[in-house]
Image: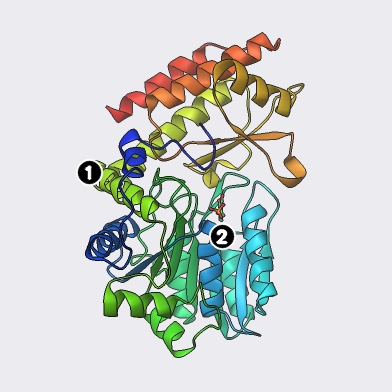
Amino acid sequence: MMLPGPTNVPNEVMRALNKPIVNHRGETFKRLYRSVIEKAKKVFKTEQEVMILTCSGTGGVEASIVNLIKKGDKVIVPSFGEFSSRLAKQISDFGGEVLEIKAPLGSAPSYEELEEAFERNSNVKALYLVTNETSTGVRIPWVKKAGSLCSKYDSFFIADAVSNLGGDELPVDDYNIDICITASQKCLAAPPGLALLSISKRARKYMEENPTSSLFFNLPRYFKFFYERGEPPFTPSIPLFYALDVALDLVIEEGLDKRIRRHKVCAEAFYEALEAMDFKAFPKRELRSQTVLAFWHREGINDSQFREYLDQKYGVIIAGGFGEVRGKVFRIGSMGIINSHHVIRTLSSMIQALRDLGFSMEEKAISLAEAKLKELR
Ligand SMILES: Cc1ncc(COP(=O)(O)O)c(C=O)c1O
């Protein structure tokens, strides 16, 4: 499975799903709940708050919106792909006045454009930024600077890091991120179904003083239940919490910095090898993601036929492109437990599949990847 989520899940994480269901209002679950929250703080690199909701990443993003954005609030949203434009719509549907900074697919708004948006508009309530646009493989290189800008203008900074937290540099306290959202099924290598949110003290205070009318996504209610009883307000997915607990143990055991480096090296091996195979990366070099790799197809390759063949004959599953570039671009998820074996197996399967389909393919791609992957030893 080389998808940009869900990703491969280690066996010990899958085995944790088999534990008996316990009372979610009993001591065993309370211990597990506290443990998962404390471990997640290490992955977000925060000493502030973390909440975990039983829903996918979209629910986590929606929770941040319904608790923070009120009718007429000005919100800056860089929009450069499916997830960031969806975010702009989601905020506007909830009554926010969205100031969208658009960029073409495969690109991203620059930091200067963001700065200009802040200069031109007064009273910006929040910046909502997708830090890694999964639909195009674009990574924002100026997240830390955006955090300083939000601090200068006294705006909230919300990061949708669904497809890069745990596989990329994103220390939320250091970057001044008020709410950072991720999901269990991407770089954390756990099964899908949980959204994790880091929440700054000032965002928490705002939410508590200006409560949302949402019931399920009412974050102050989650805080109240956590601090008064050690429980979530609603029935959590107990098996997924068991699994996430083990998945977080594995992240901590490996070391977050080492894990991020592993993602970087594996991504570089893919970029070098695929370029040697005459595939052109979709984003510009400085915007390339280290978790979701997007490439233009070579002339004559039929995207769906190729991906279907790769899956059926070689058991390797990669993803297609989104929107305007559907059929023209393919994407490889290089996250979670990604290692040398996955990189080489994916590349050699692609080479073989393309040869089977009548395309000439250079073997040197593999040796380039192998040379790069030596850095992991
Ligand atoms: C950047 C980004 N945001 C939000 C989402 C939505 O997450 P989910 O599918 O878990 O609801 C995704 C999913 O791929 C994503 O990549």
Tell me the tag on residue 58.
2
Amino acid at pointer 1: Glu
Tag 1's secondary structure?
A: helix
Q: Is residue 81 visible?
A: no
The colour style of the image is rainbow
The vertical placement of 197 against 297, above or below, is: below
Residue 104 as seen in the image, left or right of residue 118: right
Q: Is residue 354 visible?
A: yes
Assess disc 2: are there few (<14), some (14-19) or many (≥20) residues with their C-alpha within 10 Å of its C-alpha: some
The vertical placement of 234 against 315, above or below, is: below
Task: Tell me if the residue at label 2 has its CB under 8 Å from ligand 1.
Answer: yes
- The answer to which of 204 and 212 lies nearer the viewer is 212
Q: CA distance from mark 2 to mark 1?
A: 28 Å
Label 1, on which residue? Answer: 253
Q: Are marks 2 and 1 in contact (CB under 8 Å)?
A: no
Residue under the point 57% across and 86% down: 123
The disc, 2 or 1, on the residue closer to the chain's N-terminal end is 2
Q: Point out the frontmost of discs 2 and 1.
A: 2
| Image coordinates for residue 96, horizontal then vertical, percent | 65, 78
- The answer to which of 299 and 8 lies nearer the viewer is 8
Residue 15 as seen in the image, left or right of residue 369: left
